[in-house]
Image: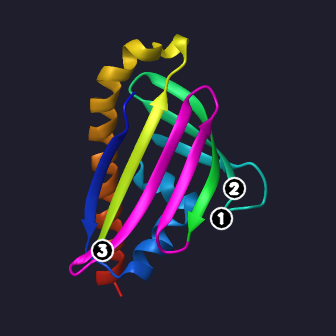
Amino acid sequence: MPPVSVSVLVDAPLDVVWSAVSDLASHAEWMSDAESIRFGDEQRSGVGTTMEVATRVGPFRVSDWLVVPAWEERRLIEITHVGSITGWGRFRLDPLAGGVRFTWTEQLRFPWWLGGPIVAWPAQFVLATIWRRNLARFADKVEESLSAQ
C-alpha cells in the first residue's frame, strides 16, 4: 500500500497537543479502529516502547504489534508495525499561527490471509477516511479540554 497521509489543524498550543499525542495509552479513546492498547512492559513512552493494539476495521480484527523507533519531544512519534501487518507510521506536529498541524502518515503491508496487495488499494481509501475522522475526534477532544479549563 502506498503511504497514506491525513492531517488536522488543532486549535491549541503545541505543549497541549504534544501532551495528548504522547499519551499513547489514551489513543484508543480517539482512534475508532483501536479497541485497546496493551504495553509490552512498563515503558509507556519514548524510543523502545512496545504495544499490542487490538485493531478492528469493519469485520477485520487483528492484534497489531508496534515498536517506537523514533521519538522527538513536541515534534514526532514513529512506529514500526512488527506483527502480521507490517510497515511504519508517523505522527508529526507542526506549529502554525493558528495552532498545530497534526499529520498522520502510514504505510502498511497486509498478510496474504487479509488479502495482501489485493486489499491494499481499497484499504488506503478506507483507512484514510477512518484516520481523518480519528484526527477530527482528537482535535475535538484537545480543544474541548482547553475550553473546560
3 or 1: mark nearer the eye: 1
Disc 3 residue type (three-letter):
Glu
Label 2 and label 3: CA atoms lie apart by 27 Å
Numbered disc 2: secondary structure: loop
Quadrant containing the N terminus is top left
| Left or right: 61, with 9 as reference point | right
Which residue is disc 1 drawn over?
A: 46
Label 3 close to label 1 by CB (< 8 Å):
no
Q: Secondary structure at mark 3?
A: helix
Image coordinates of residue 143 in percent, x first then y, are 30, 74
Magenta segment: 73-99
**Residue drawn 34% across the image and 35% down it:** 127
Do the numbered discs 2 and 1 sit on residues whose CB atoms are within 8 Å? yes
**Horizontal and vertical percent position of residue 53:** 59, 42
Q: Where's the C terminus, which quadrant?
A: bottom left
Q: Which residue is mark 3?
A: 143
Residue drawn at point x = 44 percent, y = 37 percent: 107
Dominant secondary structure, magenta: strand
Amino acid, disc 2: Thr
Instruction: Name the amino acid type tagged 1.
Output: Gly
Which residue matches tag 2? Answer: 49
Distance between the alpha carbons at the discs numbered 2 and 1 = 6 Å
**Nearer mark to the viewer, of 2 and 3:** 2
